[in-house]
Amino acid sequence: MSFTVVIPARYASTRLPGKPLADIAGKPMIRHVYERAGESEADRVVIATDDERIESVCRDFGAEVVMTSSQHVSGTDRLEEVARKLGFAADDRVVNVQGDEPLIPPVLINQVAGNLERFPQAAIATLCEKITDIASVFNPNVVKVVSDHRGMAHYFSRAPVPWARDAWSGDEWPRADMAMPEGVTYFRHIGIYGYRVRLLADFVRWAPAPTEITESLEQLRALYNGAQIHVEEAQVQPPAGVDTEADLDRLRQWMRRS
C-alpha cells in the first residue's frame, strides 16, 4: 500500500496561536503528530506550513517540510499545493493528518489509505463513529454523516440526520425528555481524509458549493460536484485533538501520568 501523509501546520490559529510548537512532554506538538504518522504504513510523511518558525523546528528533528502559501483558506488547498510541488501523479494517494492531533492512532491513517485502494470509485476516504447520546445528535458542532450500503456518503450535516420523524414529532427540539430513537444509528464524522491527487486538483478549481457555504463543511463541495466519498466506522476510537488551551492542559496532564 503506497501513500503519503501530509500534515498541515499553521501558526496563526485563532483559539491557540502557535499550537504546533506547543511543548508536550518535552517535544513540540507537531513532532508528536509526525512521529505517529511515521508509525503508519506511509511511504513518506511531509509537513506543510506557511511559517518559518514551524519550518525551522521541523527540519531540526529531521522532518521533510514544504513551505506553502499563507493565503490558503483550507487545508485541502494546502494539500493540493504540496502535491503539485512534489510532482505527485493523479492516481497517487495522500492522507491529510491534522497538525493538532498528537495522539492520532496510526491504524486510522492506514484505514483511510487502505479504503482508497479497496474502493477505486472513491475520490476521498474518511471515517466515522457511532453517536450514542441525544445531545450529540442535536449538537451542531458534531458533524453527522449518512452513507449508502457501500459506505459512500449521501450527505454530511450539522443537523440531526436522518430525522426520526415518528420519534420526534413535537414542536421543540431538543427536549429534555427526548431519547435516542429505536432502530436508527447516527454517525459522527471523524475529520481524517485520504485523497486521490486528481481530486485535489479538481477541488481547488471548484467554487464553494451552496451546501458547503450553508453548513460550513468543505467536504460538501466534493459531493456537490459528483465526487464519491467513502466512509467507514473507525477501527479504534480517536482521541480528541487540541483546539484550546484547556485541551492542551488536559493532554499535558495525561502525558505526565502515562
Image: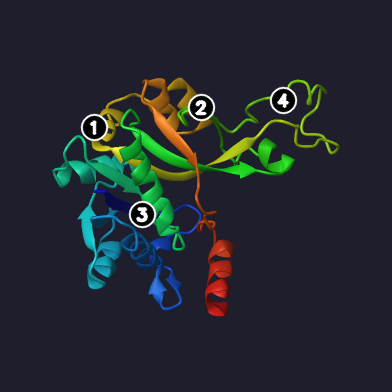
Q: Which of marks 3 and 4 is nearer the N terminus?
A: 3
Q: In which quarter of the view is residue 32 placed?
A: bottom left
89 to the left or right of 36 = left
Q: Which amino acid does label 3 sit on?
A: Arg
Q: Earlier in the sequence, mark 4 or mark 1?
A: 4
Q: Is mark 3 on a helix, strand or loop?
A: loop
Can you tell which mark lies on residue 198? 1
Q: Nearer the viewer, residue 134 or 182?
A: 182
For disc 2, the marked residue is 149
Q: Quadrant of the C terminus?
A: bottom right
Q: Nearer the viewer, residue 178 or 10?
A: 178
In the image, residue 68 above or below residue 231: below
Q: What element carries label 1?
A: helix
Q: Which of marks 1 and 3 is nearer the N terminus?
A: 3
Q: Position of residue 252 (x, y in %)?
A: 53, 72
Q: What residue type is labelled 4?
A: Ala
Q: Which of marks 2 and 4 is in front?
A: 2
Tell me what residue is drawn at x 17 percent, y 42 percent: 88
For disc 4, the marked residue is 164
